[in-house]
Image: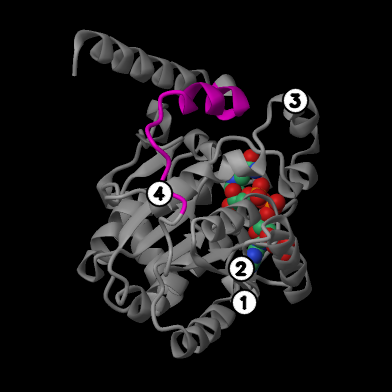
Amino acid sequence: MNVVGGMRSLLDTALDRALDLAIVPGYTSVGYRLRQTAWGEDPPPDALRGQTALVTGANRGIGKAIAAGLARLGATVLLTVRDREAGERAREEIIADQPQFQPADVLVEVCDVANLDAVRAFAADLTGRVRTLDLLIHNAGVLPATRTETDDGHEITLATHVLGPVLLTERLLPILAKSSDPRVILMSSGGMYTQSLPADDPEYLGGRYSGATAYARTKRLQVALTPILARRWANQHISVYSMHPGWADTPGVATSLPGFRVLTRPALRTPEEGADTALWLAATRPAPPSGGFWHDRRPRPEHYLPLTRYSDRDRERVWRYCAGAIGIENP
Ligand SMILES: NC(=O)c1ccc[n+]([C@@H]2O[C@H](COP(=O)([O-])OP(=O)(O)OC[C@H]3O[C@@H](n4cnc5c(N)ncnc54)[C@H](OP(=O)(O)O)[C@@H]3O)[C@@H](O)[C@H]2O)c1
């Protein structure tokens, strides 16, 4: 690298870090556009040709944008939703937007990822129908107003963001392992930076319940478990990433955070901008190192605040709790 190139890279790195620390500009479309200027080439248009990708929560928002982006890169995409009609509507919209898509490029699958029995049944069915799964994107997310438990008795954000995704991946290992370059992505949130690991109370049984806190704690859990899952699935050559999309204007934000949306709307990212890093992690070659947390195409620190730090013992403890909850016998 020459001197000018070196200076430029130093400036890019300094700007990138400043955007991360300043949060508001970094998480909005301002950060996206500034960082975009330093990115190299995008993955080529046929980067995922011949691959099969599954995206949960793909009927709207960022998940729908990820699904459309994967199909644009040539993948066959399984839009995995809990309401078939909503999935079919999203599928029609994605196909109508891109005349080059064939109907078989985008398919609808039904699974409520918070329901562990539904996840087991779905995975058993899918492994009998699909030979190889190359990409598994756990995008489904929820920010509840009140504490809710699933039929299995788990707090809903824990079930949706952690238990369901880990169980689904475990059960899909046979078809993921057939891919030459399988990748699993957990869609976390920058909100996780505000919370530590709920190692003593993963089900949020104690204290006054706040949906936003439950959301941020379980998004933290996704990030904390990523290195453990990366080691666990390394035998199948699976790369595992967690990431956050910044702040994107989606139906979920409009419903769950209306005040935040009013304040930030002009600067919010589009769902497509929120989807960018997931698409990049899915399609860039070679696969980035497994086990880390990403945002805007770069690895990011697990912590900014000293108060959120935790020990490896606590990380292991909460992993054992989750593994037990979904019936993994050898965590
Ligand atoms: N938008 C942001 O600024 C932002 C910021 C940080 C992180 N994120 C994360 O990015 C992801 C997508 O966010 P978004 O803003 O696009 O959210 P959204 O508009 O609320 O969409 C969430 C999607 O998840 C689905 N979903 C929820 N629970 C599910 C379940 N049990 N089983 C299957 N699907 C389920 C929803 O399906 P239904 O339509 O059936 O409800 C919907 O398709 C989430 O994980 C979110 O936490 C978003």
Residue for badge 1: 109
Instruction: Report the residue at 40% width, 55% height from top.
Output: 47
Query: Residue flagged by tag 1: what amino acid is it?
Result: Glu
User: Residue 266: which numbered mark, if any?
Assistant: 3
Graded by Cα atoms within 10 Å as few (under 14), some (14 to 19) or many (20 or more), the crowding at tag 3 reads few
User: Residue 281: which numbered mark, if any?
Assistant: 4
Mark 2 or mark 1: which comes first in sequence? 2
The answer to whether 158 is drawn above or below residue 272 in the figure is: below
Instruction: Report the residue at 54% width, 86% height from top.
Output: 121
> Which stretch appears magenta?
26-45
Instruction: Report the residue at 48% width, 35% height from top.
Output: 193
Query: Residue flagged by tag 3: what amino acid is it?
Result: Pro
Mark 2 or mark 3: which comes first in sequence? 2
- Measured as percent of width and height from the top left, residue 211 is found at 67, 48
Graded by Cα atoms within 10 Å as few (under 14), some (14 to 19) or many (20 or more), the crowding at tag 1 reads many
For the residue pair 75 and 296, the one nearer the viewer reads as 75
- Measured as percent of width and height from the top left, residue 219 is found at 51, 48
Toward which corner of the image does residue 254 lie, by quadrant? top right
